[in-house]
Amino acid sequence: MPSLFDGASARIQAALEHIEISQDVAQRLAQPDAALKVGVPLRHDDGRMTVFSGYRVRYDTALGPAKGGIRFHPDVGADEVSTLAFWMTMKCAVMGLPFGGGKGGVAVDPKQFSPAELERLARAYIDQIADFIGPDSDIPAPDVNTNPRVMGWMADQYRIIARAHTPDVITGKPIEMGGSAGRATATGDGAFHVLSTMMQRWGREAKGTTVAIQGFGNAGQCFARRCADAGYTVVAVSDSSGGIHDAGGLDIDAVIETKNDKGSVSEAGGEAMSNADLITMEVDVLAPAALESVITSDNAGDVAAGVIVEIANGPVASEADATLIDNRVLVLPDILANAGGVTVSYFEWAQNRQAWYWDADTVAERLEQRMVEATHALADRAEDNDVDLRTAAYILALEQIEKATAAVGTSEFFRVGRGA
Ligand code: NAD
């Protein structure tokens, strides 16, 4: 299997077959602006110390300061963080946000730590990357296994180091520390708006449409609730312990309660099913909302769903794209479908900078408007260029970055020798 980053580059190449952009932009996007690797020392409760590997990457900042989450997971490494930062660059561009792309992480399994150890780890990571981030250069946020409390510790540590109140350095904070209303549900809400907009364009109804969701964390749960409330039949959900299904539809509120009480969805009723079977089950809409590369060349041919909503980052490996296109599976690409989170993060940053806070209805309304507009722009572009939605998303993103780059002059401009 190609590396994650090779897969990301393949999507750029597919888009470049349909547009011409300056070689300057292509060259800039072939590698990150800056990549930092640090040792993150953690003093355990029993006095031991372990040093974990930490990373922060600013991929591209043509459109604004880098923006992107921090992941705590054993698989975190330089290739993964760079690829995630690259995807953030594309996501912010396709959404028209004034941000470039960044990402960070620590290679660690946080579930083994006490709360006090987790706090020390979060603060130690910020100690090591504090010179690399900032409200005008690189603004972190939560990702897998990090949450508002972790962001709160990190923002507080930055405040101590900077000796200044800078809530705009990190988004996804607790509301009491300058977080935004609506941030907690933003990714699931955004994915739901993208699906609804496309369903409207296709002339299809929620009623009678079945949905399966892999991954039942922050994003998966919220998406499930929105779908159930709108009249879709959510027939299967899963988490790392496995899945459950019920052809008549699961009671999503009850499944969320069980997941939060017992830590897994397995005891929430329905019949047990594996994560592998969920990916290939007969369903109208499949929403992978856990980790990368769960649909590869091995199982892409067996996907029975007509629509895939990519809530996770990179759930479809690039090698599987051609099979899904051949089989007429419509993929709503991650850089649009999960962009609700970064969009409300942008709202949070804007509110922090103005010290002027919006109510939940205002956030929800502005999020919906941006997601619906971006979805129509992308679907229109796909029709115009006669390409799949993912290629259209990359075309739009690359054009945005090209415009910002061209504004200060590309090789083409300077070569003809025109003055400024
Ligand atoms: P989370 O940690 O809250 O939830 C992840 C879920 O996936 C959990 O239910 C976990 O049990 C499940 N999971 C883990 N490994 C699995 C496996 N092998 N098979 C099936 N399920 C598995 O994370 P989240 O914030 O909901 O993020 C999920 C995905 O969405 C990630 O790819 C993340 O990068 C992406 N995403 C999240 C946000 C956000 O704002 N939360 C924004 C954009 C993208």
Image (cartoon, rainbow, N blue to C red):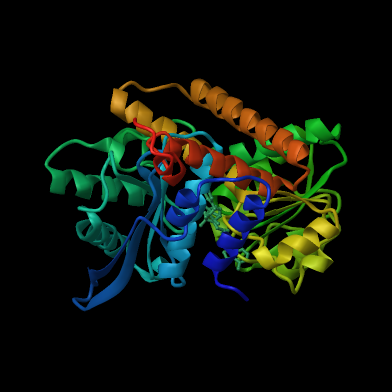
* x then y, percent, for residue 60: 40, 49
Residue 153 x/y as whole percent: 27, 50
Which image quadrant: the C terminus? top left
Which of the two residues, 97 or 208, is positioned nearer the viewer here? 97
Which of the pair 126/251 is nearer the observer?
126
Who is closer to the viewer here, 155 or 117?
155
Residue 44: horizontal and vertical position, in percent?
A: 24, 72
Write down the quadrant of residue 171 in the picture: top left
Please give the name of the residue rendered at 84% of the width and 59% of the height, measured from the top-left corner: 326
Residue 279 on image: x %, y %:
75, 63
Left or right: where 273 falls relative to 115: right
Q: Is residue 339 visible?
A: no
Q: Residue at x 28, y 58 (%)?
A: 119
Q: Where is ligand 1, by quadrant?
A: bottom right
Q: How many marks?
A: 0
Toward the left, the furthest residue is 163
In the rendered image, the residue lying farthest to the front is: 417
Determine if residue 96 is in view: yes
Residue 203 as seen in the image, left or right of residue 175: right
Q: Is residue 179 left or right of residue 21?
A: left
Residue 241's place in the image compared with 24, above or below, is: below
Q: Is residue 106 above or below residue 47?
A: above
Location of the N terminus by quadrant is bottom right
